Image (tube, helix red, strand yellow):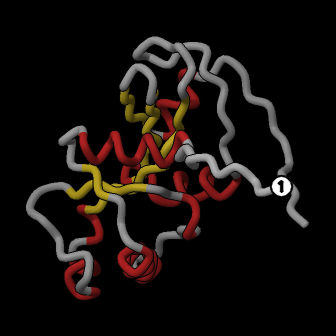
Amino acid sequence: MAKKKTAKIPSTATQAAALLVKSKKGFIVPTPAQKKRILVALAKAGKVVYGRAYDIIKIKGKPINLNDSYDVERNIKRIMIYEIKSTRRDLGPNFQKYFFALTTAELLVAQSLKEQFKFVFVNIKRRHILEQTLKQVFQRATGIYPSWSISF
């Protein structure tokens, strides 16, 4: 018997990225090649960044040609790095009682980039968007539960 094909529903993170781009707030999902240029430029600027520790960016001021390494490198301080934390739960706009994972890589990148890195919380059900620095996240935290994620 043949398997019935069903439409694949995009992950909440994928839906959140699309919502952010459509929000007209300046969010851009970089291509893999653009992401690599950004990582190289950050490394040259002495910043520690892990490739999977961010999902989306925003550019402050005039546009930057993300396909041009030189343009990315000379304007790297104007590129804001964001990690998406998404949900479809029924939460208010302040994400009160939202429970999420924070990886060590995300923590290290946030500490390295400081104000150049933010978490963007997206409720795809309610279309709420909340940007927070690491400092703001920790100020709001009501509990922190360390864990290890292991992959084989």
Q: In which quarter of the image is residue 35?
A: bottom left
**Percent from the top left, x then y, of residue 112?**
52, 60
Q: Is the C terminus in the top left, top right, bottom left or bottom right quadrant? A: bottom right
Q: In this view, does 36 lie above or below 130?
A: below
- Residue at the spot x=28%, y=80% of the render? 73
**Percent from the top left, x then y, of residue 105?**
65, 58
Furthest residue to the right? 152
Q: Quadrant of residue 150?
A: bottom right
**Percent from the top left, x then y, of residue 145?**
80, 31
> What residue sits right under mark 1 in the picture?
1
- Residue at the spot x=38%, y=29% of the render? 130
The answer to whether residue 4 is left or right of residue 124 is right
Furthest residue to the front? 1
- Residue at the spot x=11%, y=56% of the render? 61
- Of residues 52 and 3, the one nearer the viewer is 3
- The local secondary structure at tag 1 comes to loop
- Residue at the spot x=44%, y=16% of the render? 94
Q: How crowded is mark 1: few (under 14 residues within 10 Å), some or many (20 or more)?
A: few
Looking at the rendered structure, the kind of residue marked 1 is: Met
Q: Is the N terminus in the top left, top right, bottom left or bottom right quadrant? A: bottom right
The answer to whether residue 117 is left or right of residue 107 is left
Report how many numbered discs are placed on residues in the image: 1
The answer to whether residue 33 is left or right of residue 108 is left
Q: In this view, does 12 lie above or below 148?
A: above
- Of residues 102 and 87, the one nearer the viewer is 87
Q: In which quarter of the image is residue 63?
A: bottom left
Q: In this view, does 50 lie above or below 116?
A: below
